[in-house]
Image: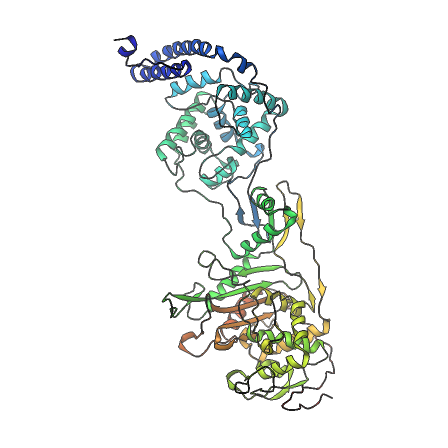
Amino acid sequence: MSTLTTLGLTAFSGDAATNVTALVKQILRFVLVNLGRVARLVVIVAVGVVTLTATIAVSAPKVAELSAAHRFERDSISLPELSERSYVYDRAGELMATFLADENRIRVDIERIPRSVIDSVLTAEDSAFFAHQGVNARSIGRAFTANIESGGVAQGGSTITQQVVKDIVGDKDQDFARKVREAVLAVKLEETYTKNEILEHYLNTIYFGSGAYGVQAAAETYFGKDVSQLSWAEGAMLAGIIRCPSGCNPFRSRGRAFSRRNTVIDALVQTGRVTRREGDIAKFTRLPAEPTRPRTPDDYFVQEVQQQLLADERLGATPTARYNRLFGGGLRVYTTFDPGLYLQAQAARNGNLPDSDGDGTFALENDPLTGLSRFGTAAMAGVEPRTGAVRYLLGGPGYDRYPFDLSQQQNRLIGSTFKTFVLTAAILNGASPDDTVDGRGPCGDVPGYPDDDPPTNFGGSGGSFNTLLYQTQKSSNCAFLRLNQIVGPEKVADVAKRMGVTSTLHPENTSMALGTDPISPLDMAAAYSVLANDGLRNPIYFIDRVEDADGSVVFAHQASPERVLPVNVARLVTSVLEANVESGTGTRARLASGQPSAGKTGTTNNAYDVWFVGYTPQLATSVWIGATGANVRLRFGGGGDAQGGRAPAQIWGAFMAAALDGEPIERFAEPEPVEGLGRLCFETERRRCPRSR
């Protein structure tokens, strides 16, 4: 039996380098199991001699390769820009959400990183960092000895500079020649950058597990705080994770994380960076139990901001460039979102939506075809007339429950809220609120309807020949169907488009005046805001400005108001809609504070969709209620069909009362009186209306 066999080792044959490596491993395994601490050190020295001798022997044939190791494809190196997450803020500068892709990172200057973190990392990874010039000839041996002495992994072999080089080069091949090349580049890196620049880059680059890259993201993920607030125990835990980001993660392996942290604390004590008492206290600190994740886009408003940025060529010429800029460019996106208005809208909806449990939804009968359950909800949108800023979106019951944004979709019929565009077009073309039009029903004289199914007024009302003001207050279908023909459907559609409607309208459809084209709640709020702003249209916008990581403005919103209606036309229409809230179909939207408001109700056929859209000088808001899927007839409380003048108007009134609470009352400007056209009528093959004067 050979000496090796006696010692429990195995003889090898084959490649010399492989044999040496395997032999050294077996010697070490035998030593660690069978010898005490003092004997271990003796054997370490012996093994070092054996290893050095063997290395020289097996490396002799590769002298040519090693001598050329410093000559390779990369002869210079620089610290690259780091990918870091972007932030979204509301109008007050409060954080709303975080845009991040594969790497959750936020760069932080080294001046903000405390000694508790820096010293812990240096102790664990490269205690001589500030003494060497990129490569430490003794680091491998010293790290090996330190690890044996501590009974764990206290130090690594490569310097921090070499680790930075390895990360930049991105080559995972660890052959001997590659190590030499990394060493050459490490020296060059330290000739180009200061120690603090290299250390700052490293601390912002290193992966800490749980998706966190860099010390700032790690501080937030593990401790829910800024890196500047980390204690010695917390800094040591992060330093301990670097070598084993998965296995030493406290959320996955608390035992290993605890042991690794305490190993770093012991090293801090041994090097005099902390006192024994501070170290003992740090060891009693509990490990974090749950991660703190950055809030990713989970809101209708933020989702819209994201889509706009991904389509904005100011962030890049290609979709890929824009994606990388948004999710890795460290942008700061400042939006128009008002969290106070959003919460008030949510409270008004949840508190006034019929048949609801207070969660913004109401149950509907199961789908008769599939048997699946269905539910309805309300959507809202708010636009500031004087600027065009979108102040909030309430796109449904919540993005987590229903991710499709109902406040911007364009597949909901708007009912009689469209009559406002017909009224506006009429006044723009010379009519007055005091002019009269035939509102009697049924109105079979309107072209486009079959003789046996003429249109009627709501509820079969007979109607009357009366003023535009009166017909608006009664929301007379027949009056507005006739008025649409008198003014011209193309002119009506043009007015709606100029005021802000972006969806397709069909003027060839005689019923357009009754809201048979789908328009989104946001478009309706935007269009009505033109009336609140005396005919001046401010295009709606969500983003005030975007800054890069250094605070430089990438782009900012530029106001571009456009006059789309004469001042007096807007004021005349407002006077009619204000009267509608006071004594028409919109009385439930009246504000108890005395703040004047104007608006129009809307109810579609079969009560599939019910609306109220209104405004004050400060804010234009739309409210829609309906089913989330296919059309479903709405009947609340077991009663008759739902109507826009009930729940939608009530929600609108409750919201606006809260939104304007404490604000000074602003009244609408009085319009100049106009003569008008008198009696408005049109001729058909069936009969001749009285002529206009």
Q: Nearer the viewer, residue 142 or 661?
A: 142
> Which quadrant, please, contains the C terminus?
bottom right
Q: Position of residue 186 (x, y in %)?
A: 57, 22
Q: Position of residue 124 (x, y in %)?
A: 46, 25
Q: Residue furthest left?
A: 1
Which residue is located at x 43 percent, y 26 percent? 264
Q: Position of residue 393 (x, y in %)?
A: 55, 60
Q: Is residue 533 above or below residue 335?
A: below
Tell how many labels. 0
Q: Nearer the viewer, residue 298 or 7?
A: 7
Q: Is residue 427 above or below residue 152?
A: below
Left or right relative to 399: residue 675: right
Which residue is located at x 55 percent, y 24 percent? 161
Q: Is residue 486 above or below residue 136?
A: below
Q: Position of residue 627 (x, y in %)?
A: 46, 68
Left or right relative to 62: residue 681: right
Q: Nearer the viewer, residue 583 or 302?
A: 302
Q: Can residue 476 be seen?
A: no
Which residue is located at x 42 percent, y 9 percent? 49
The chosen color scheme is: rainbow
When asked about the image quadrant of residue 591, the answer is: bottom right
Which residue is located at x 47 percent, y 12 percent? 59
Q: Residue furthest front?
A: 14
> Which quadrant, please, contains the N terminus?
top left
Left or right relative to 385: residue 103: left
